[in-house]
Amino acid sequence: MPIKELYGLVVRPDGSGFRGRVSFSDRIEAIEATAQAGDDYILPGFIDLQVNGSHGLDVMAGSAEEIRALAHHLAREGTTAFLPTAITSPIERIIRVHGAIADAIAAETAGSSAQAAAIIGMHLEGPFISPMRLGVHPKLNLEPRGEQFERILALERLRLITLAPELDGALAAIRQLARRGVAVSIGHSDATLEQARTGIAAGARMFTHLFNAMRPLHHREPGVAGAAMIPSEALAAVIPDGVHVHPEMLRLVYRSRAAAGMLITTDKVAVAGAGPDFAPAIGDERVRIADGAARLSDGTLAGSIISMLDGVRLMVESVGVPIGEAAMMATINPALILGLADRGAISIGARADLIVLSRDLKLKAVFISGHELA
């Protein structure tokens, strides 16, 4: 594969930047400072750990082909790797969704994946969640133990799971999952501060969509939201769409955790990028776009409609985070959660998953394994 070169403001893994040149084939070959670089930003491709759907494609109902089509759409938004996300459902349905994701990964491996985001496994959000913090999840929550848990633990492509640490059996489950190499995220939880801290001590390394579907912050009992704002090994994932979390609250989290303690996810759903008449069902309800997010008819939030780039822009423009640090939240930090050593950073030997942004943060180019998207 011939060597390509990009010139611009290169973002380092620590969020700092410099004017330089990146040389790459399918991997990054060289990184050099040069005063001749232009003003475009050169970033690693975004890694989204929570994608329920987009462009009319729903992970819970999708075939392997549809999940691959979803990967195609996400790549054109600057996302070069992602976790298709399944939500609380009967175990048999979760296993079926896992099978579709596994088949999509197998097809990606067998064919050319240079035009689509990499499917890096499944994020399972539930069913081991609090009945008090379901959000739009159905009332099918289970305790993380016994045969049902063992069937989930056996899913080969499971990479991340959201669960509530206060449930009976949760701490042992977190330890088992961590030993198996599955990242655990605390979410859909009514945990106290101490229960959340105990979950972190057991091996949890993330908080799912901070402030949403969790015990709220209180000055006498900080709760799980308070635990997410206190520096620890567990990173606070936020949905920066200006709806799920007010920009001033995002600013508060940033001041508390700094860029190294946060990551961006979209939690986007099938109505994102779909036509105005598309209204998929959740139970007996229909999901539609209203007031900047996906909602049920009573206004309950049912996911976001943003891209990862939209989230980065909001962190820069509304929260005041430097572009390099906002990029950290969307690249190296998600990679660290999953232990991905070969992506998420512009470093020698890393996959050449790169995006180019203009100074006003518009997407100019996407490269996946060194191939520019058509």
Image: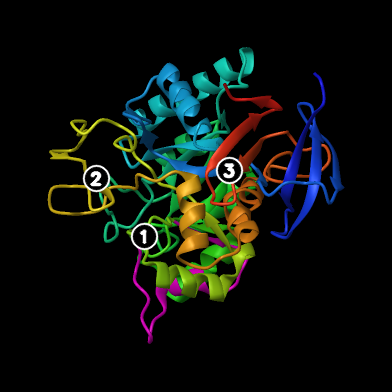
Frontmost residue, 50 versus 27: 27
Q: Which residue is mark 3?
A: 46
Q: In this rendered view, identify the residue nearer to me: 310 or 288.
A: 310
Which mark is on residue 242?
Answer: 1
x 55%, y 25%: residue: 116
Marks 1 and 3, how far apart in space? 19 Å
Q: Which residues are magenta?
A: 214-238
Classify 10 Å Cα crowding around label 1: few (below 14), some (14-19), many (20 and above): some
Q: Residue at x 74, y 53 (%)?
A: 12
Q: Residue furthest top?
A: 111
Residue 88 sits in quarter: top left
Decide: is 345 above or below 219: above
Mark 2 and mark 1 in contact (Cβ < 8 Å)? Answer: no
Nearer to the camera, 196 or 315: 315
As measured in the structure, the alpha-carbon distance from the residue carrying label 3 to the one carrying label 2 is 30 Å
Kind of residue indicated by mark 3: Phe
Mark nearer the viewer, 3 or 2: 3
Residue 65 drawn at (x, y percent): 44, 17
Q: Amino acid at mark 1?
A: Gly
Depth order, front residue of 178/49: 49
Tell me where residue 257 sits by quadrant. bottom right
Query: Which residue is label 2 attached to?
Result: 138
